[in-house]
Amino acid sequence: MEEVRVYHSLWKNLLFIASSFAFTAGFFLMDFENKQLIKWLGILFFGGGGLFMVYLILKERITGTPCIVITDNGVSVSSGKSFEVRFEDVNAFFIIDISKTKQIGIRYKKGVREKKMDNAKQFERLIRKANEKIARAQESIPAGGLTIKPQTLCDLMNERLKAFQRHHQINGQSSSAAQ
C-alpha cells in the first residue's frame, strides 16, 4: 500500500496562531505595575506557542516533511517530539477527546506496555501512569489541526494495523506449515 502523509493545516491552526499573537500583544501592552514577571511570562507563553505552531507549519511546507507518515509497518510522528509506532507492537488505535483536544491513543500489546514502562525514567514513568489513568493509553498522537479529520486518521491507522496483522498471520501460518 501507498504511504499516507499528513500535515498540519494552516487554516485549522490560523485561529490558534492569531489568538496566541493577540494575547501576546495584550500582555505586551498591559501595565501590570509591580508584576512584570506575569507580563513577561504571558508574552513568552503565548508568543512561544504561536511561534512554535508557525515554525511547525513552515518547516513542513518548506521541507515537505509531514508530521505523520503511515506506512505498511507503522506510523512515524514528527511533531515537536519525533517517535515511531510499529504495528507489531500495537493492539489498536482509538480517539481520545480531552478538553476539546483530539488525540489518537495507542493501545500497546501487554508485553510492550510493560517494557516501555520499565525502560522509562522516573518522571516519564509518572507521566505514563497518569496518561493510562486519564486517557487509557501510555502514549498518543496529536490529531487536531491536521489536514485529515482525527476519526478518519484513526480509522485509517486501524485499517493499516489490521492489514499488517493479516499479512503477518498468513505469512506466519505458511512458514510454519512448510516446516
Image: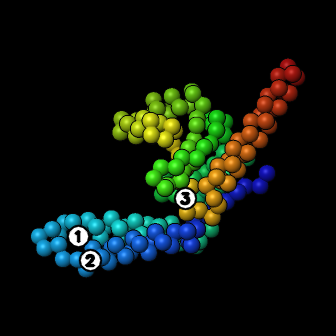
The residue positioned farthest toward the bottom in the image shown: 29
Of the two numbered discs 1 and 3 on the same chain, state the one appearing first in sequence.
1
- Residue 103 locus on image (x, y percent): 54, 51
- Residue 72 locus on image (x, y percent): 73, 47
* In this rendering, position of residue 38 left or right of residue 94: left
| Image quadrant assignment for residue 161 | top right
* In this rendering, position of residue 3 left or right of residue 60: right
What label does residue 112 carry, if any?
Answer: none
Q: Are marks 2 and 1 in contact (CB under 8 Å)?
A: yes
What label does residue 39 carry, if any?
Answer: 1
What label does residue 28 carry, if any?
Answer: 2
**Which residue is at 54% across, 58% downward?**
144
Of the two numbered discs 2 and 1 on the same chain, state the one appearing first in sequence.
2
The reply to whether residue 92 is visible in this rendering is yes
- Residue 6 locus on image (x, y percent): 64, 60
Q: CA distance from mark 3 to mark 2?
A: 29 Å
Graded by Cα atoms within 10 Å as few (under 14), some (14 to 19) or many (20 or more), the crowding at tag 2 reads: some
The residue positioned farthest toward the right in the image shown: 178
Front in this rendered view, residue 120 or 94? 94
Q: Are marks 1 and 3 in contact (CB under 8 Å)?
A: no
- Residue denoted by label 3: 144
- The type of residue carrying mark 3 is Gly
